[in-house]
Amino acid sequence: MILSGALKDGTLGLKFLKEAGGIALVQDPAEASFPDMPENAAMHDGEIDLIGPIETLAEFICEQVGLQPLSLSAPPG
């Protein structure tokens, strides 16, 4: 998963992740505090499985591991 950051090291890591059969998730650059790394990853030649806001990425991960996502908008109780 590529989140907020700078430089291009995340893109290189994403390449190796995909080569190993992993799932590539990238934070929407529009919501990142430091959008350089997500923007670089979004322009990566390889396949990205999902680009989206943090909540969407969290929901996707929960679905992949068979968990029900928690609502971030209201505290439990």
Image: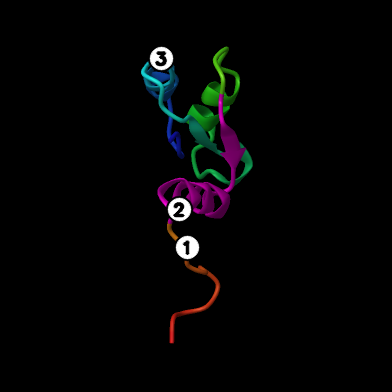
Give the CA distance from mark 3 to mark 1. Answer: 29 Å
Q: Which mark is residue 62?
A: 2
Mark 3 and mark 2: Cα distance apart in space: 23 Å
| Vertical position of residue 64 compared to residue 11: above or below | below
**Res 68 label:** 1
Pick whichever, 70 or 7, lies toward us: 70
Quick one: label 1, few (<14), some, or many (20+) residues within 10 Å? Answer: few
User: Do the numbered discs 2 and 1 sit on residues whose CB atoms are within 8 Å?
Assistant: yes
> Does 61 sit left or right of 73 as displayed?
left
Residue type, numbered disc 2: Cys
Local secondary structure at mark 1: loop
Residue type beneath disc 1: Gln
Location of residue 76 in the rendering, given as x and y in whole percent from the top left corner: 44, 81
Residue 8 location (% of width, % of height): 43, 19
What's the colour scheme?
rainbow
Q: Which mark is residue 5?
A: none
Task: Say whether marks 3 and 1 touch (CB < 8 Å).
Answer: no
Residue at (50, 45) in percent of width and height: 33
Looking at marks 3 and 2 on the same chain, the residue that comes earlier in the sequence is marked by 3
User: Which residue position is annotated with label 3?
Assistant: 19
Please provide the residue range marked out in magenta.
Answer: 48-66
Front one among 55 and 68: 68
Query: Residue, x 46% and y 47% (percent of image)?
Result: 61
Residue at the image position 54 percent from the left and 55 percent from the top: 55
- Looking at marks 2 and 1 on the same chain, the residue that comes earlier in the sequence is marked by 2
Q: Secondary structure at mark 2?
A: helix
Q: Position of residue 11 (x, y in %)?
A: 45, 20
